Amino acid sequence: MNRVKCLIIGSGPAGYTAAIYASRANLAPVLIEGPQLGGQLTTTTEVENFPGYPDGVEPFQMMDDMKRQAERFGTQFVSGVVTKVDFSVSPKKVWVEDTEEYEADAVIIATGASAKYLGIESERTYKGRGVSACATCDGFFYRKKTVAVVGGGDTACEEANYLAGLCEKVYMIVRKPYLRASEIMQQRVLNNPKIEVLFEHNTIRLTGEGKVQGVDLFYRKGEPDEATKHIAIDGFFLAIGHHPNTDLFKDFIACDPEGYIITDGASTQCFKCENAQMGKCENKKIPGVFAAGDCADPHFRQAIVAAGSGAKAAIEADKYIKSL
Ligand code: NDP
């Protein structure tokens, strides 16, 4: 068993920033890196909106910079996945890979969020054989081919632009008559001659012999001019949002119906009750358990916001530990 003051779960901007602050406060934090080192950001191509990088930065570089900064002040990193927690006791208990046990005065949850899928059967059939949720990871396999990206947000636009740099042709399958993405991302997509946006289209099924070779689409389903359409594609990329990685904690802390951890307003402290309505949770906070980043943020989901909340969580953890 390992006894620590401050345990941080997750290695995205929230986790690393919490580690920088906690280690500078002499909490000698241990950070459990989780299944995706560097977090979700490492699935994007370039970060252009994190202050301090006027020319943009590669996400792996930025995450490595954060890690080294935390390391400099004494954070200890553990590669592995947290498989079980017990927040009903003090100190809190956390197990890594079911075997390694940690006891911590304070735990900072920074487990982020993961890509959503449409939920259609053929998506599962072709997973890894033409279906992907990460253009940066898998786009290389589709050089000079034709792909489709589902979604109309910033992620979808970013993925479509990235894929247009590799592929012959990129379709965007957008269910609304407009893109939800920020203006600059929309313009990049709409001005890219390799990208064709199919507005008001929804996916029916994927088709192909052993791998994705096409997709059947509905156009304006339920409207007088509804139609179906088939397009030939080699790859199908999901970019329809994310769900928070919080299943592991749900027996101990309050989450909203979508699974995002509910925190105490401006604070990062977690609540005890399940299926909580904020009003009913007063005085039921869990001392020593804090949440930061996308696992507790259904609204902004930005690296800089996650980093800011990581700093807040570490400051609150420090205060809590000093009060013991
Ligand atoms: P969003 O929630 O913003 O967008 C999801 C998109 O997927 C929407 O167009 C939505 O359609 C569509 N969608 C959702 N479910 C389905 C479905 N079942 N079938 C078809 N389409 C569906 O998620 P993002 O991941 O794009 O962005 C999340 C946050 O991260 C945002 O705040 C965004 O601004 C930010 N971000 C910023 C970046 C940057 O600044 N560089 C890069 C990437 C993300 P509808 O519009 O109809 O709901």
Image (tube, rainbow, N blue to C red):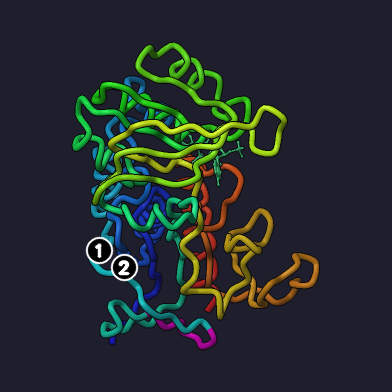
At numbered mark 1, what does the secondary structure look like: helix, strand or loop?
strand
State left or right for residue 196 relative to residue 153: left
Residue nearer the viewer, 313 or 60: 60
324 versus 301 height, above or below? below
Q: Amino acid at mark 1?
A: Phe
> Residue 203: percent from the left, percent from the top?
50, 42
> Residue 20: percent from the left, percent from the top?
36, 53
63 versus 324 height, above or below? above
Mark 1 C-beta closer than 8 Å to ligand 1: no
Residue drawn at x 61%, y 45% is: 299
Residue drawn at x 26%, y 60% is: 74
Q: Is residue 92 magenta?
A: yes
Q: Earlier in the sequence, mark 1 or mark 2?
A: 2
**Which residue is tagged 1?**
77
Inspect this view and state whether residue 42 appears.
no
Residues under labels 1 and 2: Cα distance? 6 Å
Mark 1 vs 2: CB contact within 8 A: yes
Residue nearer the viewer, 125 or 68: 125
> Residue 198: percent from the left, percent from the top?
51, 26
Residue nearer the viewer, 70 or 131: 131
Q: Which residues are magenta?
A: 88-94
The N terminus lies in quadrant: bottom left
**Which residue is tagged 2?**
30
